[in-house]
Amino acid sequence: MFKPRQLLKGLSRRQLSFFLFQMIDFYYVRALIVRTILKTIKIIYTMENIKTIQQVEPAVVVRANTNKAGKAGLILAILGLILSWVPVVGWGCWISGLIASIVGLFNAPRGMAIAGLIISFIDLIILIALIGTLALIL
């Protein structure tokens, strides 16, 4: 069995101090190596975090593409459909809804413009029927 005291027993003071300084240097160097490795790991970890942070794209606010003319045409067509029994107001809403829906067809998205155009055509049929009924009565 190895006993460190037996190893150190036969050494002179000078040899013993040299041995101790070598041991201290060894522990100091080992501590430096461990510290350097830990710093390197920390730098690599930090660099990976920076890369991860840089890879994340900035938040982009995506505005919904709206068709204001199509929306106005839809609202006016619905209003014209509701007010189709009022002679001048209903006709004015109908014709404005028809024009706004036609303008809205040239912009994207076209869904509301198409709906406004369909409602305008339904309103046109109702207006023709209403005018025909009024002509028969008078």
Image (spheres, rainbow, N blue to C red):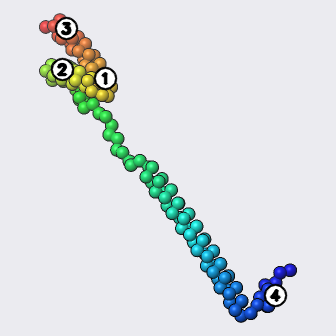
Relative to 72, residue 56 above or below: below
**Disc 3 designates what residue?**
132
**Disc 4 designates what residue?**
6
Q: Quadrant of residue 71?
A: top left
Residue 34 coordinates in the image, percent (x, y): 60, 71
Instruction: Tell which circle, 3 or 4, labels the residue nearer the N-terminal end.
Output: 4
Q: Is residue 118 left or right of residue 42?
A: left
Depth check, mark 3 against mark 1: the one in front is 1
Q: Quadrant of residue 123?
A: top left
**Secondary structure type for disc 2:** helix
**Secondary structure type for disc 3:** helix
Query: The disc labelled 4 sits on which kind of residue?
Result: Gln
Judging depth in this view, the residue of 122 and 131 nearest the camera is: 122
Label 3 crowd bin: few (<14), some (14–19), many (20+), radius 10 Å: few
Residue 73 coordinates in the image, percent (x, y): 24, 26
Depth check, mark 3 against mark 4: the one in front is 4
Query: The disc labelled 2 sits on which kind of residue?
Result: Ile
Look at 31% across and 25% down and name the residue there: 110
Residue 137 visible in the picture: no
Depth check, mark 4 against mark 2: the one in front is 4
Q: Quadrant of the N terminus?
A: bottom right
Q: Is residue 124 left or right of residue 41?
A: left
Query: Residue reaching furthest bottom?
Result: 13
Query: The disc labelled 3 sits on which kind of residue?
Result: Gly
Count of picture labels? 4
Residue 67 coordinates in the image, percent (x, y): 27, 31
Between the residue at mark 3 and the residue at mark 2, the CA separation in whole angstroms equals 18 Å
**Secondary structure type for disc 1:** helix
Relative to 60, residue 118 above or below: above
**Disc 1 designates what residue?**
115
Depth check, mark 3 against mark 2: the one in front is 2
Look at 60% across and 71% down and name the residue there: 33
